[in-house]
Image (cartoon, rainbow, N blue to C red):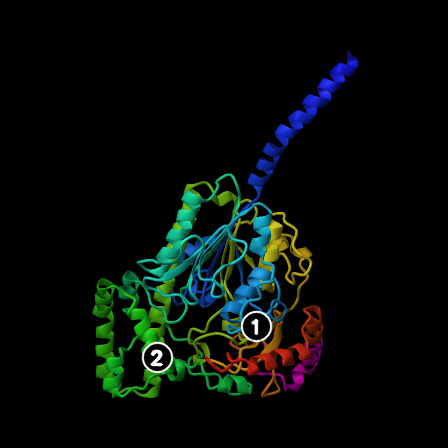
Amino acid sequence: MKFTNLLIFLFTGTFFSCVVQPQQQAKETAKRPNILFIMSDDHAYQAISAYDKTLTSTPNIDRIADEGMKFNNACVTNSICSPSRAVILTGKHSHINGKTDNHFPFNKDNVTFPQIFQEAGYQTAMFGKLHFGNNPKGFDQFKILIGQGHYYNPTFITKEEGKKDYKGYVTDIVTDMTLDWLDKERDKEKPFMLMYLHKAPHREWLPDEKHYKEFTTKTFKEPETLFDDYAGRATAAHTAEMNILKHMNWAGDSKLYPATMEALGIKEGSHWDYEAFNKERDRMTNEQREAWDKVYKPVNEDFAKKFASMNEKELMQWRYQRYMQDYLGTIASVDDNVGRVLDYLDENKLADNTLVVYTSDQGFYLGEHGWFDKRFAYNESFKTPLLIRWPNKIKGGMTNEEMVQNLDFAQTFLAAAGIEAPSDMQGESLMPLLTGNDAEWDREAVYYHYYEYPSIHMVKRHYAIITKEYKLIHYYYDVDEWELFDRKKDPHEMKNVYNDPEYKEVVAKMKKDLADLRVKYKDNSEIDQRLLKMYLESKYANNG
């Protein structure tokens, strides 16, 4: 009898455990946090009011900072679109993942963090701008723009329907896709890892109707260094082709109609200037183009009346205002739509268990040093916005000053989800900083390396080490020059103190630390020369 009871007990216990265990696993799975990764393209930290209220207001993006943590020293490893995205996906520096510039293709053998999330039982989706490839691995659903994509009536590559045209404004469309997936397609019993990626505010900066009507009437404060002459800086600052007056396109960027330019005798800013203008405007419907013309034709007419009497300074000031009006106008749409997604999380009781990140693929110049674009290890390009919200894990309104990079994102997300990261990832999880355990964080310096030269904007190849106090940059290939900036005393990076005797010991230490970082991240001069040789021999070099 006892033996029979024992068998019954063992059988029912085993049976019961077989039934209950999956339920327990489901509960454990449900507790895993959702990950919402929001990234814009070329969104300068100066254009987020949580960082700086001088230029614009971004109340919805600011919500993430108000309810979470703002990083003041977040930065990138390589300030250019595709390489930054490859670093984020792989958790590896550009020379390791192979995507060193915008020209060479992404190595499909790379393991990306979305693949790891998918294998761990997460639902994964990507909507918006990836910028390379048309079949991203590790996603249950995706709808991505072709290359840079278009602001009006864009075409997407979709996982299930191939290429598909959408009518409307790109920032709204990407958000509609994201909300539609959250509301109708995802399995609400499973956690998700969602990448919500905006095209804006990438060049050529076409705002939607309600925002260009507003922003073309605004005037913005000029940066202190708008008329920088680069005195005391290395050759690279003097030869870069990023000046708003000299190098920005008149039609594509400043929105002068080709007919206006021809009437005034203004030559195209580049060989693709008219093309950039026409390819965007031609995508508009008749109704969209009519609304556009009602605002931008008067802008042209006003400029035409003043042009003959304008000197170089006045032309620079006019072009700066035109730049800010359109650039910040596209950001207004991003902010509106981020608000839509945050509201959805709140309304559907998803906010408490969702880690939300807002960042950009790099920083951007908004007239500082007279420039637009990025690429340099200088602050406006190198620094990137990073705001992270995770209710019940991160206290609201927190600010962090540690040196963190886009290299760290993959490991942070995996750690938050309790998933082991591959040992060959090169970043560090930000979890200690997010949860108040700053003592566990020991990074003092970050490594930067830019490769795409000679090419558009002509920013020379360079690598750098950056701490909270100093920045040491080495330019190589066609020059061999160094720059050292005292980040505390010279926040605008106007004075290179590399040859200043007072900084002799700082230079020596920074050079040693830079050499150590190169070893740590498996970079060296042989790799520099191999990658340079590949680039120069490639059909992609010098094609802009």
Which badge, 1 or 2, comes first in the chain's sequence? 1
Q: Secondary structure at mark 2?
A: helix
| Residues shaded magenta | 494-512
- At horizontal 40% and vertical 82% (from top left) the residue drawn is 247
The three-letter code of the residue at mark 2 reads Asp
Describe residue 189's horizontal placement relative to residue 428 as left or right. Answer: left
In the rendered image, residue 393, in percent from the top left (x then y), is placed at: 57, 47
Q: Position of residue 323 (x, y in %)?
A: 36, 73
- Mark 1 highlights which residue? 100
Question: Label 1's element?
Answer: loop
Point out residue 452 in the picture as x, y percentages from the top left corner: 53, 77
Which quadrant does the C terminus fall into? bottom left
Residue at image position (49%, 61%) is: 359
Q: Is residue 327 left or right of residue 511?
A: left
Q: How many marks?
A: 2
Residue of label 2: 273
Task: Classify 10 Å Cα crowding around label 1: few (below 14), some (14-19), many (20 and above).
Answer: many
Task: Measure the alpha-carbon separation of dots 1 and 2.
Answer: 26 Å
Residue 245 location (% of width, % of height)? 37, 83
Q: In this picture, is 258 found above or below 15? A: below
Residue 342 circle label = none
**Kind of residue indicated by mark 1:** Thr
